[in-house]
Image (cartoon, grey):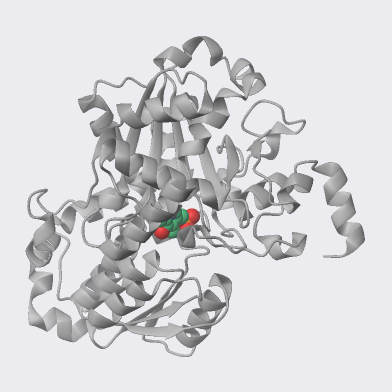
Amino acid sequence: MSELQLDVLKSKYPLLTPMMACEELFWLNPLATGLAADSTAAPEAMFTAEDVEAVEARLQHFRPYLKKVFPQTEAADGLVESPLKEIPEMHKILAGEADKKVEGRLLLKCDSMLPISGSIKARGGFHEILKLAETIALREGMLQLTDDYSILAEPRFRELFSKYSVAVGSTGNLGLSIGIMSAQLGFHVTIHMSADARQWKKDMLREKGAIVVEYPDDYQKAVAEGRKAAANDPMCHFVDDEGSADLFLGYATAARRLDFQLRELDVTVDEEHPLFVYLPCGVGGGPGGVAFGLKLLYGDNVHCFFAEPTHAPCMALGMMTGLHNEIACSDIGLDGKTAADGLAVGRASRLVGKIMEDKLDGVFTVEDDKLYHLLTKLADSEGIYIEPSACAGFPGVMALQDQKDYLDRMGLTGNMSQATHIVWATGGSMVPEAEMQSYYNKGKTL
Ligand SMILES: *Cc1c(COP(=O)(O)O)cnc(C)c1O
């Protein structure tokens, strides 16, 4: 991007200046908040409720299989789902530190505890691989839609899937979910890992039988290399984190399950009882899919905000400028370096920005040091351990309180005492204990 182009953008979007200085910011989406001059900009619906329902049905079919091959899913009868918890002690700490009252209830969606791969990537990643297996088995005439899918654990299916391979580029957690599920089914699987991926993730994947290829560069490069390798092999399925519909729709199934959990906690979502959801964002697929599903269910009564590191705010940048995946953090001089390895992405998904253009309420950014601090506070107050990336949602709860114009404009001010806030804790239970301890210790010093 030329100096001139950048100057034009900066004068059009004043928040670019603090963004370029790696300062924290809170961007509110004019297309979602009734401010847009051109509110007909809403793109055609790329996905529908029926698309999400079809994926829900597919995941139902797979429950007997998952229950059989992953004993950790037995108690939930093969459902891969995470708890929703009230966190009153953390609520007090947040309010105390910010010296302001946060009305309503504060809940934590513990995707950090999703079985098998311990992060939000279990939602999208498992779906994409299970669908691939289903498609191949149906095509070969070895499976019928009416079958009990636990037969997929039989050796003849492993033999079938071993003729195929799977490839993905990842900063870590997507690699874990794709690698573990693919290897279990019998696929050959290669994970192209970026430099920020943690060593333990590489070790764990190799242990499960995945091939791990390491790149000294960033996530984008790892994805590009994965794509290139897969393109030369007709038997290889490439999981495209930058634009996969199967990933996106897998994430979207979180919404209806969350709705059941909210009912169990006696939470109402309607015009007088708004729901606010704070989702850590990397390339955008995970938070985008979840937010999309929630919007289908709750419409204007749910307000979704994405959280990004100050050094890698690719979604804020893409949404604000409307350039989506056509602009990268490096174009505005940002280095993309962050301790939030799950969020270390310089360019947003080519799918999500456009789908969420008129649905996402806003994006805020968070400094790395705050993530460690929040990690430690959550551990101390609630005994819940999550990874640094997964803490990014918390500051949004506080920051939203300062967005008075937004709250007024949306007619929310009078209803905040009846609001529910959900911080989406996107990962953490797979982090080795020593590694988690070092995160915790770091947070203590900050
Ligand atoms: C991947 C990831 C995210 C963000 O998901 P994207 O689809 O990349 O936006 C958030 N938190 C954690 C822990 C992750 O691994």
Is residue 320 visible in the rendered image? The answer is yes
Based on the displayed image, in which of its 4 quarters is residue 268 positioned? top left
Residue 115 vs residue 88, the one in the foreground: 88
242 left or right, relative to 129: right
Tell me if residue 282 comes above or below residue 425 in the rendering. Answer: below
Name the spot of residue 381 as percent of width and height, x first: 31, 36
Based on the displayed image, in which of its 4 quarters is residue 70 positioned? bottom left
Tell me if residue 397 comes above or below residue 185 in the rendering. Answer: above
Of the 4 image quadrants, the one containing the N terminus is bottom right
Name the spot of residue 352 as percent of width and height, x first: 54, 52
Residue 440 vs residue 1, the one in the foreground: 440
Residue 59 vs residue 345, the one in the foreground: 345
Residue for point 44% across, 17% down: 103
258 left or right, relative to 68: right
- Ligand 1 resides in the quarter of the picture at bottom left
Count of picture labels: 0
